[in-house]
Image (cartoon, rainbow, N blue to C red):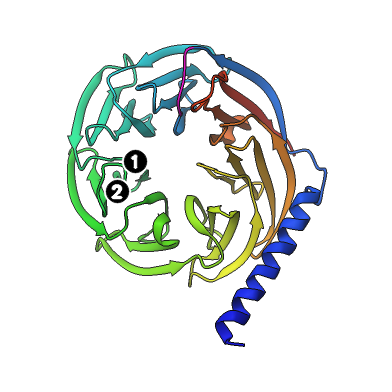
């Protein structure tokens, strides 16, 4: 028997054992999330995408990807405050309180749109490549890194573009020979940026100063890596894959996989609470997988919290001890919702 076959059999055995444990439920019945508010959203169909919060201003922003809007809610009560409609296909959002500006990637026309936080009017836009999607912000440099291109445009390649927000200009870009580039995570103590190449089942490591790819790490045990989070203190990447649904923990110094656990299916976000060591993965199949970090290399699933089908995007607001989850009706006639959970100890 070849070495390759032996390795594949070993991986399959590990996956079957993990799935068997997962089917029986979490190792602990410890409470982790308490549903405190459900906001029904009549009139919405299709998918929502990502969320962001304005904590000081008490607002929550939600990208209505298929509704062609950005919805604004009261962060405490869930009351709808406003609909921003000058967008085509909004995906990722960033709110900066210093400027009181909301930044929206619009996949329809390839623009990064900038809205006033006071009156929600369009202030400016920066033209990039069509298919704008994921973003990550370098606060120290005031630079936004934006993913564009890919199969939805359609293109057989994608781009990572650095945008100087104060100057409203692009600073450089990297071309990936990949048609499905997903979430990113940034290192604040160094110059690295981690990028999920979903169609390659790899994590690309980018040097932000040089705008060069310095490494590509294969996930190995799973594919379609989409959400991504980073524990900078312990140098660990949390890579959420969809095939099979799995949370993969990688050593961010060398790309080695140190842990893997089954997770909620078709997840589009992952949240890491560095203070508690908790990881939250919302999946469209209708539940949130919650994990506890024991140490850098050891993790335990502590809860499987029921949500609703289509609940695949979420944002954690640590200051309020709240997790906000968007329920997309997709192609069904189900009611769109916003679910608010209290994060418990």
- Give the residue displayed 24% in from the left and 21% down from the top: 122
Q: Nearer the viewer, residue 102 or 314?
A: 314
Q: Tell me the element at label 2.
A: loop
Q: Distance from label 2 to label 1 (Cα)?
A: 10 Å
Q: Which residue is mark 1?
A: 133
Residue 329, above or below 243? above
Q: Tell me the element at label 1.
A: loop
First along the sequence among labels 2 and 1: 1
On screen, residue 98 versus residue 295, left or right, reads: left
Magenta residues span 43-47
- Give the residue displayed 19% in from the left and 41% down from the top: 128
Mark 2 and mark 1 in contact? Answer it, CB < 8 Å. Answer: yes
Nearer mark to the viewer, of 2 and 1: 2
Specify whether residue 45 is painted magenta: yes
Q: Position of residue 99 (x, y in %)?
A: 31, 29
Q: Quadrant of the N terminus?
A: bottom right
Q: Quadrant of the C terminus?
A: top right
Is residue 305 something one can see in this rendering?
Answer: yes
Residue 307's image quarter? Answer: top right
């Amino acid at each position: 028997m070849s070495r390759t076959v032996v390795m594949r059999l070993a991986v399959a055995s590990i996956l079957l054992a993990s799935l068997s444990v997962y089917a029986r439920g979490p190792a602990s019945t410890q409470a982790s999330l308490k549903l405190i508010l459900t906001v029904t959203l009549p009139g919405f169909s299709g998918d929502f995408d990502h969320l962001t919060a304005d904590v000081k201003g008490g607002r929550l922003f939600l990208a209505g990807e298929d509704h062609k809007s950005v919805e604004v809610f009261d962060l405490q009560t869930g009351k709808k405050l406003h609909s921003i409609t000058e967008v085509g296909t909004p995906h990722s959002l960033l709110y900066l309180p210093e400027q009181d500006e909301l930044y929206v990637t619009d996949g329809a026309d390839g623009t990064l749109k900038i809205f006033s936080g006071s009156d929600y009017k369009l202030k400016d836009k920066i033209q990039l490549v069509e298919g704008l999607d994921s973003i990550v912000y370098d606060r120290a440099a005031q630079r936004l890194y934006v993913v564009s291109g890919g199969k939805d445009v359609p293109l057989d390649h994608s781009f990572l573009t650095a945008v100087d927000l104060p100057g409203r200009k692009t600073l450089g870009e990297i071309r990936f020979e990949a048609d499905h580039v997903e979430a990113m995570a940034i290192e604040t103590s160094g110059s690295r940026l981690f990028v999920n190449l979903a169609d390659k089942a790899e994590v690309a490591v980018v040097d932000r100063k040089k705008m060069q790819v310095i490494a590509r790490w294969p996930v190995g045990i799973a594919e379609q890596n989409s959400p991504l989070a980073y524990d900078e203190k312990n140098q660990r990447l949390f890579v959420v894959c969809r095939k099979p649904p799995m949370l993969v923990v990688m050593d961010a110094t060398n790309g080695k996989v140190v842990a893997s656990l089954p997770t909620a299916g078709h997840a589009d976000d992952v949240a890491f609470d560095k203070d508690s060591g908790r990881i939250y993965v919302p999946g469209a199949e209708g539940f949130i997988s919650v994990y506890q970090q024991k140490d850098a290399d050891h993790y335990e699933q502590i809860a499987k919290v029921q949500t609703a089908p289509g609940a695949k995007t979420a944002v954690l607001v640590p200051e309020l001890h709240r997790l906000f989850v968007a329920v997309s009706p997709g192609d069904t006639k189900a009611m769109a919702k916003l679910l608010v959970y209290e994060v418990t100890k």
